[in-house]
Image: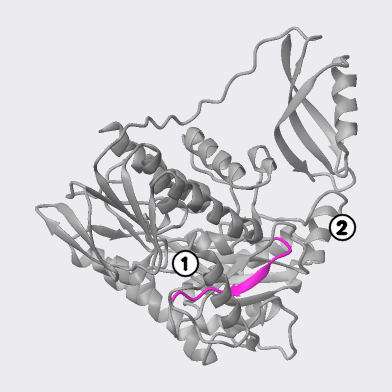
Amino acid sequence: MGIKTISIKLPTDYSEQLLRNQISRQLGIREFTFRTESKSLDARNKRNIFWQLRVVVDSPQLKGDHEKIQEELIIPYKKRKQKIVVVGSGPAGFFNAFALQKAGFEVTLIERGSDVKIRGAAIADFEQGGAFNGANNYAFGEGGAGTFSDGKLTSRSKHISKEKLFILKSYVEAGAPKEILYMTHPHLGTDNLRKIVVNLRNEFENLGGTFLFNTLLEDLRIVNGKVDEAVTSAGSLEAEAVFIAPGHSAYETYRMLIRNGVPFRTKNFAIGSRMEHRQETINLAQWGQATLPGVKAAEYRLTSQADGQHPVFSFCMCPGGTVVPAAAYAETNIVNGMSFYKRGGNFANAACVAGIHPDELAGKTVSPLEALDQLQKLEEQFFNYTGGYSAPFCSIRSFLAEKELAGKAESSFPLGLLPAPLWTLLPKPVVESMKVGLQDFIRKMRGFENGNLLGFESKTSAPIQVIREKNGLVEGFKNLYIIGEGSGYAGGIVSSAADGIRAAMSLVEGN
């Protein structure tokens, strides 16, 4: 019995039988089993677009080494009496709580919003003209902001292979498609995520964990650098350790932490608007054809050095997706992107953002609290311009020319568009950098100038970062951990979840 790993090129609409035939032909064998190790689309030559696969083949007709086993995360279990409180049910908070519960701690996970069913109904009501719901929206509620997103599982973080494998396998066991284990750019889609987060929650509770919805962290009782209690809207919870995964939107949580002496610093972040195109435009630019059999929808990842000081880049690209009203608080107006697993919508969208520091935005050195205040004021400014939650928009051509052009725009955005001079609503350094970046994007992708810019994109990353140790423990505190995207050290589903797991394992290994 032997094992070989081989590379195979296949047409985009290949069948399982064609793959088997190719394996058989390449290795000269008939009896075998196989496992796809990786799969990526090669579209560099538009006349010859194909899938590139790496396949691990096992056969009695082969001579070869045994398959190298991926190193997996080991969570040692023993009954532990320590009570742990985890705040926030996004990827960082959930996987932190999940790992701690598997290790035998008594874990209570609190979430300010409701379960995903109630949350989804609140969002649907809002988008159909109902009132904004401060507890259940695109930022808050079960699963965090990631639940209502494209569900991308790519990550540039290094040295998290064990954690990443644990995360992906947990998703598959909770109902995710198995392809996420080998696709180069895997994604779940919000339709899958809404089911997965429920299945994961059920597994957490089956292990003995406690999940409390509609429970907002309001304060911490701290004695000599140690948190004794988490004060919540549903009462106080005793804790031997507290892990807070606030996400990027919980401004009042940030402010409460700062008030309690948690050290933060300002850092570079990125803001801008969301670009939207017809999906067919992106398909033609990337593939040279309107559709490609066997592939859902074309993606893009674009970067520009712009003026050399403010890098401009696309972010959270949603093929076949929807631009959504992502405000976390009433009387603020921001946008984000979402798509379903099949990515079958008529539009493609992605953020176009420029990196900048809060000090430059303010024209002076600002504190973490002041950085939060100025970002919130920008979000309120967009709300005040529209008088609600419709999205101010202009064409990319108008933005570049700083000239309003007549006409309406087709869009996936559910609450309507309002023509607006976005170049006057966004900070000037961001506008100037975005203009250079967009010109670069147009040179790289044919037809890119035929898109629109919508609203204010302010949640690519947080403008502040907690000062903590590598294990997530806050500097100056004995048992308080800040994790995930809201810590300022992670971004996206996988890296945030891995950050939560690593913080959990530091406690497990110390006990």
Q: In which quarter of the image is the N terminus?
A: top right
Residue 491 higher or lower than 369, as above or below: above
Residue 367 occupies quadrant: bottom left
Where disc 1 sits, the SS reads loop
Task: Identify residue for label 1.
Answer: 141
Residue 146: x and y, percent?
53, 59
Q: Residue at x 65, y 47 (%)?
A: 186
Query: CA–CA distance between discs 1 and 2?
Result: 36 Å
Q: Would you say residue 320 sits in the magenta stretch? A: yes
Determine which residue is flagged by label 2: 291
Residue 110 is labelled as none
Q: Confirm whether residue 59 shows in the render.
A: yes
Residue 315 sits in which quadrant?
A: bottom right
The answer to whether residue 364 of the structure is visible from this angle is no
The answer to whether residue 68 is magenta is: no
Q: Amino acid under label 2? A: Thr
> What residue is drawn where x is 43% and y is 69%?
113
Task: Residue 209: give x, y in percent of width and height.
Answer: 38, 49
Q: Position of residue 272 (x, y in %)?
A: 53, 71
What stretch of residues is rendered in magenta?
319-328
- Residue sitting at 67 percent across and 70 percent down? 322
- The amino acid type, in three-letter code, at marker 1 is Gly
Total number of numbered labels? 2
**Vertically, is 166 above or below 332?**
above
Q: Is 485 left or right of 14, judged from the image as shown?
A: left
Q: What element carries label 2?
A: loop
